[in-house]
């Protein structure tokens, strides 16, 4: 890995002149590490005496109501009760009563824990007391933020809207409103746009028209739209970004309903049949469906966990949104939704003042007493950003849009009486969620400072934490996964939050000074290729700095005294807790560091394990076999009869019998006995027939029965074991990625 010179900016650099290069960040991190090392290793008297100044001088007495038993059997009772409950959750059915019992148990243990924490503050010095209080308040706010989301789980019914959609499909013979399908685009690759158009044409609904809304004003896209027989709209300017593009289409189309798909999303063929029926109810303005992705997000891909863990948005789309639907608080998510034209016109069209339009437009609908519905069915599939930097830019843009909503009180008066109490509580929960980067930074930095300088944030011996803290921690990690039907794993959420922490803090500060400014990229790159590993130093340097400082502190506190008596440091109450907390944080930081190493992406098309009997026809010869995998660009074909392998030419035709599909192919490579003793042939498709393109897209993407398009599931224990494996197996750094 070659680091750029931070004193100069090369002409090829893509950094803006005002940005700091990765080399400068590295220099800063090394300088800070050297400074801390110098302070610690000098063994100055003031540093040696810090634990005595910053920690309580006397043994703390707990109130009688909080005194813990001396009998070991009673000492283990809270932990054993929690362990028994967590084990019972593996067989306990989901029901409002069982959810209520788990929530009450969680609440009781939480009250017990935080009552004890009030008496575990470090009052030895005003400095340590201040940090100890900040740490306790952060814990309280963090726990409160997601307990607010778990209370409505008593009414959680993820299949309620699906049952309603089943009943409404019968209405479509009499109720068939016109639908305009909008595909807003800017600078995306023409292949991606063409694929989405073809998928939209496959939607099983007669009364529909397709519009490509081109903000890139490209003649190439106009030609594709003309070839495929769809409408092309391109406005004279790009005012207000995507919102302006959608408003221009609103004024130049006249359908009853509008379905919107970002150009990297492909709808299933039953999308409109499952959603249109809801609009028979005149109160419904919009029906939102989940966002689901056909490729792995950056962290699962970089850590080698493809098809193991659910996407990081799984919790939001399959738990939070169905709950919000119960209280008419659904968030519009910008794609894969259907809206009523008259409702959009009633609120003045799409909201244009923020960097994103979806959440704000949905809020306008709610403020005007329209109903927004959430159908918890995967009815489309899209592409998640392939690189960490693009992922961060996308999520930072979403976060900035969320914050801007709270700065738009004049046009979006969410705290007024126009919303219900529950709706305002949900907006409050999002506001608290925007503070997550600050809370995560405190969780990372304060335990590290306490460990380096010898003061505690929790002034209690380990035995007390074992009695009061550990049962609550285990319960909150295990019970929350069960309450969310394993859509949520707190320890993996801490990984996402840690990766987002420092870029988010920078963006939040920028937004606070200029709420409606433009920062970072306004468009997410799609379908990018990269033939090398990419070490994102600008993003990962905080994790390197943390691990370096923790390693130095651990060495000087526990290793150096073994080498020289001059390095002896006095112990302090709570030291063991701080060390354990830092070890856990170090594990998280290691995983974050490994996830920051982007693996090469050499294939433009995702491969899927599509296995079907097929025939390879070459110059009148037929070679029977089976496809091993399939993509938009080619296939891997396993030969059954290999004795005539030498007859295979570079030009051939692949015939998929089950689909009655014939595809001209180029033979790229032939490998004898490459697959269980059978020969394998690599094929590249030469698609020139639009009908064949549609059939292939239907096979790969828009058939909801395909297993690789289903929601991924994992148990809480499996997800934790995968976490440990990721910390101990730095695949991203130690392996060479073969994408051949």
Image: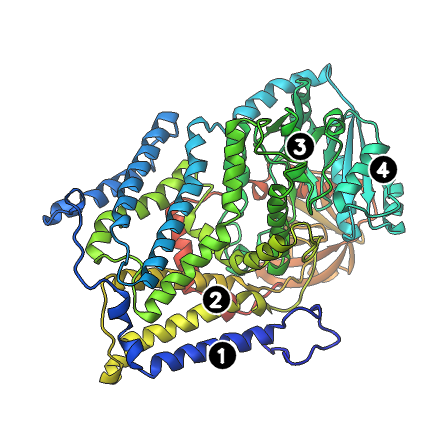
Gap between marks 1 and 2 measured at Cα? 15 Å
Question: Which is more toward the observer, 120 or 13?
Answer: 120
- For disc 1, the neighbor class at 10 Å (few under 14, some 14 to 19, many from 20) is few
The answer to which of marks 3 and 4 sits earlier in the sequence is 4
Residue 543, labelled with which disc?
2
Residue indicated by mark 3: 364
Left or right position of 739 against 720 = right
Tell us which disc is closer to us: 1 or 2.
Answer: 1
Residue indicated by mark 1: 31
The answer to which of marks 4 and 1 sits earlier in the sequence is 1
Left or right position of 148 against 631 = left
Residue indicated by mark 4: 230
Tell us which disc is closer to us: 3 or 4.
Answer: 3
Above or below 268: residue 672: below
Gap between marks 4 and 1 measured at Cα? 59 Å
SS state under label 4: loop
Q: Position of residue 223 (x, y in %)?
A: 89, 47
Q: Which of the 4 image quadrants contains residue 95?
A: top left
- For disc 4, the neighbor class at 10 Å (few under 14, some 14 to 19, many from 20) is some
Gap between marks 2 and 3 measured at Cα? 40 Å
SS state under label 1: helix
Gap between marks 4 and 2 measured at Cα? 49 Å
Say how many tags the image has.
4
The answer to which of marks 2 and 3 sits earlier in the sequence is 3
Gap between marks 3 and 4 measured at Cα? 31 Å
Gap between marks 1 and 3 measured at Cα? 50 Å
């Amino acid at each position: 890995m070659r680091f750029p010179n931070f004193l100069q900016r090369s002409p090829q650099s893509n950094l803006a002149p005002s940005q700091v290069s990765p080399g400068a960040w590295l220099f800063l991190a090394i300088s800070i590490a050297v400074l801390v090392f110098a302070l610690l290793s000098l063994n100055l008297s003031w540093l040696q005496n810090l634990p005595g100044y910053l920690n309580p001088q006397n043994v703390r007495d707990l109130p009688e109501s909080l005194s813990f038993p001396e009998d070991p059997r009673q000492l283990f009772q809270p932990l054993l009760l929690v362990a028994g409950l967590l084990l019972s959750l593996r067989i306990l059915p989901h029901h409002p009563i069982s959810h209520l019992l788990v929530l009450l148990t969680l609440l009781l243990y939480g009250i017990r824990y935080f009552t004890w924490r009030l008496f575990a503050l470090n009052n030895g010095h005003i400095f340590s007391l201040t940090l100890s209080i900040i740490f306790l308040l952060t814990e309280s706010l963090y726990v409160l933020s997601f307990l607010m989301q778990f209370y409505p789980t008593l009414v959680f019914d993820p299949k309620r809207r699906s049952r309603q959609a089943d009943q409404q499909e019968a209405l479509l013979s009499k109720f068939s409103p016109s639908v305009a399908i909008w595909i807003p685009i800017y600078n995306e690759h023409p292949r991606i746009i063409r694929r989405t158009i073809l998928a939209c044409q496959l939607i099983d609904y007669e009364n529909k028209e397709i519009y490509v809304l081109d903000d890139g004003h490209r003649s190439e896209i106009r030609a594709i739209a003309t070839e495929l027989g769809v409408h092309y709209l391109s406005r004279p300017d790009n005012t207000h970004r995507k919102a302006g593009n959608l408003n221009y289409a609103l004024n130049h189309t006249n359908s009853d309903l509008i379905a919107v798909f970002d150009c990297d999303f492909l709808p299933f063929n039953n999308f409109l049949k499952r959603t249109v029926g809801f609009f028979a109810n005149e109160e419904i303005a919009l029906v939102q469906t989940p966002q689901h992705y056909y490729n792995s997000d950056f962290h699962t891909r970089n850590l080698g966990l493809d098809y193991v863990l659910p996407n990081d948005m799984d919790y939001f789309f399959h738990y939070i949104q169905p709950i919000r639907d119960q209280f008419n608080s659904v968030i519009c998510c910008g794609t894969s939704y259907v809206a009523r034209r008259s409702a959009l016109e009633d609120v003045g069209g799409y909201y244009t003042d923020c960097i994103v339009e979806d959440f704000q437009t949905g809020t306008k609908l709610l403020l005007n007493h329209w109903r927004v519905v959430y159908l918890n069915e995967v009815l489309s599939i899209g592409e998640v950003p392939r690189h960490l930097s693009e992922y961060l830019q996308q999520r930072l843009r979403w976060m900035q849009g969320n914050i801007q909503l709270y700065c738009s009180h004049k046009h979006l008066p969410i705290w007024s009486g126009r919303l219900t109490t529950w709706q305002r509580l949900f907006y409050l929960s999002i506001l608290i969620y925007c503070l997550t980067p600050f809370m995560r930074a405190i969780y990372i930095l304060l335990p590290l400072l306490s460990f380096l300088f010898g003061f505690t944030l929790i002034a209690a011996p380990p035995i007390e934490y074992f009695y009061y803290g550990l049962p609550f921690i285990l319960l909150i990690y295990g019970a929350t996964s069960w309450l969310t039907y394993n859509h949520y794993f707190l320890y993996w959420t801490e990984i996402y939050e840690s990766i987002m922490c420092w870029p988010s803090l920078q963006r939040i500060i920028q937004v606070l000074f200029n709420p409606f400014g433009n920062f970072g990229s306004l468009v997410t790159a799609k379908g990018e290729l990269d033939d090398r590993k990419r070490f994102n130093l600008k993003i990962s340097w905080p994790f390197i700095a943390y691990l370096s400082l923790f390693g130095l502190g651990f060495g000087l506190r526990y290793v150096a005294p073994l080498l020289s008596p001059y390095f002896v440091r006095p112990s302090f109450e709570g030291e063991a807790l701080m060390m354990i907390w830092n070890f856990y944080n170090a594990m998280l930081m290691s995983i974050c560091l490994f996830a920051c190493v982007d693996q090469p992406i050499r294939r433009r098309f995702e491969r899927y394990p599509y296995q079907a009997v097929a025939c390879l026809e070459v110059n009148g010869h037929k070679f029977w076999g089976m496809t091993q995998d399939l993509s938009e660009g080619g296939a891997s074909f396993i030969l059954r009869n290999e004795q005539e392998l030498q007859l295979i030419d570079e030009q051939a035709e692949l015939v998929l019998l089950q689909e009655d599909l014939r595809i001209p192919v180029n033979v790229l490579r032939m490998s004898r006995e490459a697959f269980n003793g059978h020969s394998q042939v690599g094929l590249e498709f030469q698609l020139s027939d639009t009908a064949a393109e549609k059939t292939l897209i239907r096979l790969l993407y828009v058939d909801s029965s395909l297993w690789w398009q289903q929601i991924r599931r994992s148990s809480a224990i499996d997800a934790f074991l995968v976490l440990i494996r990721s910390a101990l197996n730095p695949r991203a750094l130690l392996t060479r990625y073969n994408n051949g």
